[in-house]
Image (tube, grey):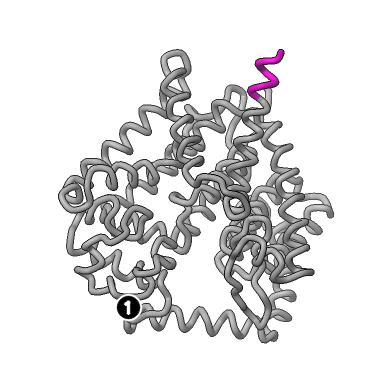
Amino acid sequence: MLIALYKDIVKLLVIFFLFFQVALISAFPIPTIIDEIIQASFLIALIAISRNDDRARFSLKFYIVIVACMGLMSYPALAHRGVMNVAMQIFVHSKYILYISALFIFFDVEKVRKSIQFLMVVSVIFLLFDLAFPKVLNNFFGVDLQLRGNAVRPVGIQAHTGTLGFLFSVFSVYILFYIKRASYVWYFIFLVCVALVFVTTVRTALLAFPIIILWLFKDSLKQASAILLLVVPALLVFSKTKYADELVYITQQNIQMSIEEPQKSAYIRGMMLYFSFELANQNFPIGTGAATFGSVRSDDSNVYAYLGVHNSRFFIEKDGIYDSNFASILGEFGYLGLLFYAAFFIFLTSPKLLPKGYTLGDGCYPLLILFMLYSFTNPVFMNTFQIFSFSLFYFASISKEIET
């Protein structure tokens, strides 16, 4: 009894820390290495039970294969990046396997769903507080102010605008496939989710809603049409606002600068995407190896000097060069490395990972699609908050098999 209670408390503390990690580290003198320690603990736990647990054995084998492939493809990088940098970056790239495996094997679905309710209530409260009292949370967490539409962009309890938008985006997919779509409550929550994502000011987060609508077309044209009747008028009204004009202008400028003068571009994500294709073409088919481009261990990589961007302020200040996970994977592992996306999809949809009596829920595939699209503009595989949050919602989206 006491052992079971202790395990539950430890699990809740792990969820709490990983979810609020950025805010906790920003506000208190907490070592940043704790998430790596938790990640390593998950690996040790998988190894410990793999002999007697089929799911742990499957996850461990998958992890070993992915790590081995990344290691072999990174062999050319060892000479100039060192074994430690390469090994640590591979550990970061493959963290999704450990977080997802740990949730599926060691956690209870219903308890995770209850945890999500609490975490989202806290997140919404802090978002509303941030909107009502702008700059307060920025000052408390020591986060630089960012403006969009002449308004301060919120950071919430997540202490970061980008991760705040990501959270409400994946939550929207999760909750809208968790609630029965036949009820009026569903349509109300849909509008609430749109509002929550909109006020985060994160453009990529809006991807959640076309994915939801397109996925609903698959099941019911009538339901999807009802959503369109709500969305289209709202979009028409929104398109006439100054905020919409600014979003369109920013997007156009980002694309134009990324294509015309990538070395001088003020849009770092576009710059990284452009050069990732250049590296993939020049080093076909395997790229430049782990810890060389667009990843957290790539600081001062000679690849940046080779590309002629090492004197750019982005690479000196380390500002935004990790933001595109697609670019980092393509640059470091080439076109062959894009198979890691296929491996990610196969791993998450494998019946071997599911708890007994469960199957993939309606929201699992839309969440996967959103996550993969998000990787173009966010470090979703490398960022602990993003991969752990996605893992929580994905795990909570599985459903019990219907008994026949």
Considering depth in this image, is 315 or 29 the residue closer to the camera?
29
Number of labels in the image equals: 1
What is the x, y in percent for residue 38? 50, 35
Eyeballing the image, is 333 above or below 401? below
Quarter containing the N terminus: top right
Considering depth in this image, is 45 or 357 the residue closer to the camera?
45
- Answer few, some or many: residues within 10 Å of disc 1's Cα (few below 14, many 20 plus, some between 14 and 19): some
Does 129 sit left or right of 51 as displayed?
right
Look at mark 1 in the image and give the residue it sits on. 262
What is the x, y in percent for residue 403? 68, 23
Q: Which residues are magenta?
A: 1-7
The prevailing secondary structure element of the residues shown in magenta is helix
What is the x, y in percent for residue 37? 47, 36
Residue 161 on the magenta span? no
The residue under label 1 is which amino acid type? Pro
Q: Is residue 215 something one can see in this rendering?
A: no
Q: Quadrant of residue 140?
A: bottom right
Eyeballing the image, is 326 above or below 83? below
Residue at point 66% right, 52% down? 171
Q: Quadrant of residue 278?
A: bottom left
What is the x, y in percent for residue 213? 64, 60
Residue at point 51% right, 45% down? 31
Q: Is residue 96 something one can see in this rendering?
A: yes
Considering depth in this image, is 377 or 345 the residue closer to the camera?
377
Residue at point 59% right, 68% down? 202
Does 56 sit left or right of 20 as displayed?
left
Q: Quadrant of residue 315?
A: bottom left
Residue at point 63% right, 56% down? 158
Q: Secondary structure at mark 1?
A: helix
- Looking at the image, which residue sits at the far front? 29
Quarter containing the C terminus: top right
